[in-house]
Amino acid sequence: MHEHSVISVAHVTKSYGSLVAVDDLSFSVEEATCFALLGPNGAGKTTMMKILYGKARPDKSAGMRIDVFGHDPRTHELEIKSMTGVAPQDDDLDEELSVLQNLTIFARLYNLPKHAARERIDFLLEFMELTQKKESRIRELSGGMRRRLIIARALLADPKLLILDEPTTGLDPQVRQLIWDKMRGLKKEGVTILLTTHYMEEAFQIADRVTIMDHGRKLMEGNPRELLETEIEGHVLEILDKNAVSRLVRSESDRVRMEEAEARVLFYSSERETLRRMAEGLGHGEYYLRTANLEDLFLRATGRGLNAGQ
């Protein structure tokens, strides 16, 4: 393990028959930080998460090592689970019960004393802004409320590690921003967060470190802001109609990189002025000049085509 790492993974592989879901993956996570696994559907993100808390078993391979707060999930699954809260991608709340009843049942599974459980539940309902809904049945809740409840449930036992699998998929911007703020607060309180997401803005906002992966393999890793500075040009000119490309103002000295999407053409450059000059012959509705973002880097790393699972 690195000196301050609380999670260390080395050379982990997981196969399901001929499908290699995780392929020789290594990474480490420091305490009280957010580490994000980014990748298309089927990249192996969820499988890697399940390996960490003992729900999936990695293949036996030379040099493989998994250490979670000093424990190996293959031999000390319960110890890791006692320190871990998991908010799964799937909604598995009991539809027939109320918000309060769902949390109370899980508190019993954690063997929390009745009085302590009630205090913790009240705190988490307030923390996730669900106090007014505590007597509501699950089927009466919006999608955003259900996701917040699943995260609250994952926090019941005051975990040292919080695993969030696609926590804000399908949620509106207000709920997404609220969850991001709560995650920032948890980090300040010393909670380590492992996140899978395909929202690049989410990873950029809250992750201290990201691994971009595809087909089970790591493509690149680092702080998201540093990756943007070192791995991709700073500016993008999006041509929204391919027919407009012929009217671009080009010179031999322009150092630009071109990518083609389905109906667009994108030009990347470290010099914004170069791209602005190229677009001088176009109308305002034909192009979009912007700063490069993590999604651009993600697409450069993984490609713009769809995987079979998408």
Image (cartoon, rainbow, N blue to C red):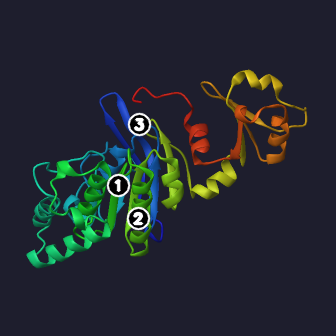
User: Dots 2 and 1: beta carbons under 8 Å?
Assistant: yes
Q: Which residue is mark 1?
A: 164
Q: Tell me where residue 270 appears, x and y as whole percent.
A: 77, 47
Q: Which residue is mark 2?
A: 183
* Residue at screen point 28% across, 71% down: 126
* Residue at screen point 58% across, 48% down: 294
CA distance separating discs 2 and 3: 23 Å
Dot 2 alpha-carbon crowd within 10 angstroms: few under 14, some 14 to 19, many 20 or more: many
Q: Earlier in the sequence, mark 3 or mark 1?
A: 3
Which quadrant of the rendered structure holds the C terminus? top left
- The dot on residue 57 is none
- Look at the image and tell me whether residue 70 can be seen: no
Tell me the kind of residue under disc 3: Asn
Q: Earlier in the sequence, mark 2 or mark 1?
A: 1
Quadrant in the rendering for residue 75: bottom left
CA distance separating discs 2 and 1: 10 Å
Q: Tell me where residue 305 appears, x and y as whole percent.
A: 53, 27
Tell me the kind of residue under disc 2: Met
Mark 2 vs mark 1: in front: 2
- Most distant residue in the right direction: 252
Which quadrant of the rendered structure holds the N terminus? bottom left
User: Dots 2 and 3: beta carbons under 8 Å?
Assistant: no
Q: Tell me where residue 154 appears, x and y as whole percent.
A: 26, 61
Give whichever of 220, 199 is nearer the camera.
199
- The secondary element bearing badge 1 is classed as strand
Q: Is residue 296 above or below residue 168?
A: above
Quadrant in the rendering for residue 102: bottom left
The answer to whether residue 243 is left or right of residue 16 is: right
Q: Which residue is mark 3?
A: 41
CA distance separating discs 3 and 1: 16 Å
Q: Is residue 302 above or below residue 202?
A: above
- The secondary element bearing badge 2 is classed as helix
